[in-house]
Image: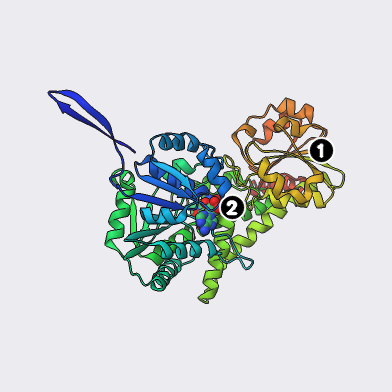
Amino acid sequence: MKFEYYLLFNDQIVCEGVILSMYKNKISIIGTGYVGLVTGVCLSDFGNTIINVDIDEEKIKKLNEGIVPIYEAGLEEIMKRNVEAGRINFTTDIESAIKESEVIFIAVGTPPDEDGKADLSAVLSVAETIGKNINGYKVIVNKSTVPIGTGRRVAAEIQDQMAKRAVNYDFDVVSNPEFLREGKAVHDFMHPERIVIGTDSEKAKEILTEVYRSLYLNNTPFVFTNLETAEMIKYACNAFLATKISFINEISILCEKVGADVQKVSLAMGLDSRIGSKFLHPGPGYGGSCFPKDTRALVKIADEYGVDLKIVKGAIEANERQKYHMVEKIESHLVELKGKKIGILGLSFKPDTDDMRESPSLTIIPELIKKGATITAFDPAAIKEAVWRLKEYEKDIVYCANEYEVMKGVDALVILTEWNQFRRLDLRRVRNLMKGDYFFDLRNIYEKKEIENAGLKYVGVGLPERKEDLDYEKKQTTIESGL
Ligand code: NAD
């Protein structure tokens, strides 16, 4: 949202422009990954002056050459425009960035450690560096997803470092969790459903309201709360969404057994405004950098407080099972996987991103290979990622230049990620290219009929598909009609 202004003199426009942020001091974003880069670029587009920092020299070098290291629609264009306007720059010099800025966002990774707990080493290392370099009042804004209590630990670390230097500057720590979706990150940042600001400090609240001024004036709901509540909100949201997906995936397994159609179940459920239709689509399980790690981390946090989060644990377990259920589904139809050639469409955990962190493909492809299959695969953005993540299986995977190359001579085709370009395949061409005739649509993006009309056998998720299921359906109808 931008606010246009016009200065009039004798009814003539003498000056016009766009008022964006009213915040005039510099802002540093430490960590220039998915969240940090999108935050930096979008905040600069709101009119703020941004220093994006990362320890990864290669990444910063690329950004300084105008190359965006991640695949995110619209990002490169907005970045270019703000680099040209001098509102954003990229550096590895974290010390200077801290000294020059009043607001410092922390957006480094919090990957799971071997126990599933969030690894806070990067967040705490940034806090240490802030403490070593703080030279005046700062607002430290945590955008990384962190366990409840981390904001206080960040404050304590900064205080410790200042004590060692025998200085004592005023500072505030704020929790400002990020809710953007990869693939739609720019849109989500520019049009958020809410901004959560967790702090006890009125001064920090006012500064952040200025930083997000364009959103504030645009009536985006702002939730002001304390640090702990803001940190909890992020985990509660992700755990709820993951649970919703696992719920419909479990229902889909039952649908397959009883001859029900999960698509209709999901449609009717979603029409209930108390439930809502989003995140109610069955598939091969959720993945990505957030849901798997945040659900596991939440369970660990709860364990530490003696709280048994049974529902979240169930969602995690159901998600793991779903990936294996997909392999069993493919195996049961092909009778055996040994010697079979399987074409895979989509490798990223969802469309419009090259992110493969915890993608279902990283479980499903190795399982198919272990059972004796070989793979041809294509993804519009994630092949580079797949090559190193699936390195162990490289001799059994051929990466293809496009979706049709994948299909040549395969026994079965599997849609793993619902990229738009896989939604309108030339089905006659598909049939002609394939050796076998099984079409596994693990995202339910096709109608059974259209696939069958092309001479292929359709297998979706949560749909009646087996003879015994159809028999069951027939039996039910007979019972209902009293025959
Ligand atoms: P990422 O791995 O893409 O990026 C993290 C970046 O931080 C990397 O570029 C890394 O080099 C850099 N870094 C690590 N240590 C550093 C240090 N000491 N100083 C400077 N830079 C450092 O991670 P991400 O996906 O952007 O996630 C960041 C945080 O945001 C995580 O806590 C994540 O859970 C959360 N989050 C992610 C998403 C998402 O969709 N990816 C959405 C909401 C929240």
Q: Name the secondary structure under disc 1.
A: loop
Q: Position of residue 346 (x, y in %)?
A: 66, 40
Q: What quarter of the picture does the N terminus occupy?
A: top left
- Identify the residue at horizontal 28%, vertical 45% (top origin): 22
Q: Nearer the viewer, residue 266 or 168?
A: 168
Left or right: residue 326 versus residue 199 is right
The image shows residue 316, relative to residue 351, as above or below, that is below
Q: Which residue in the protein does label 1 denote?
A: 411
Q: Residues within 10 Å of mark 2 (few under 14, many from 20)?
A: many
- The answer for how far apart the CA atoms under marks 1 and 2 are is 29 Å
Task: Check disc 2 and give the amino acid type.
Answer: Ile
Q: 305 or 113, which lies in front?
A: 113
Question: 68 and 251: which one is in front?
Answer: 68
Residue tagged 2: 248
Residue 290 position by quadrant: bottom right
The residue type indicated by label 1 comes to: Asp
**Relative to 351, does residue 454 appear above or below in the rendering?**
above
The correct choice, above or below, for 128 with respect to 280 in the image is below
In the visual, does 456 lie left or right of 275? right
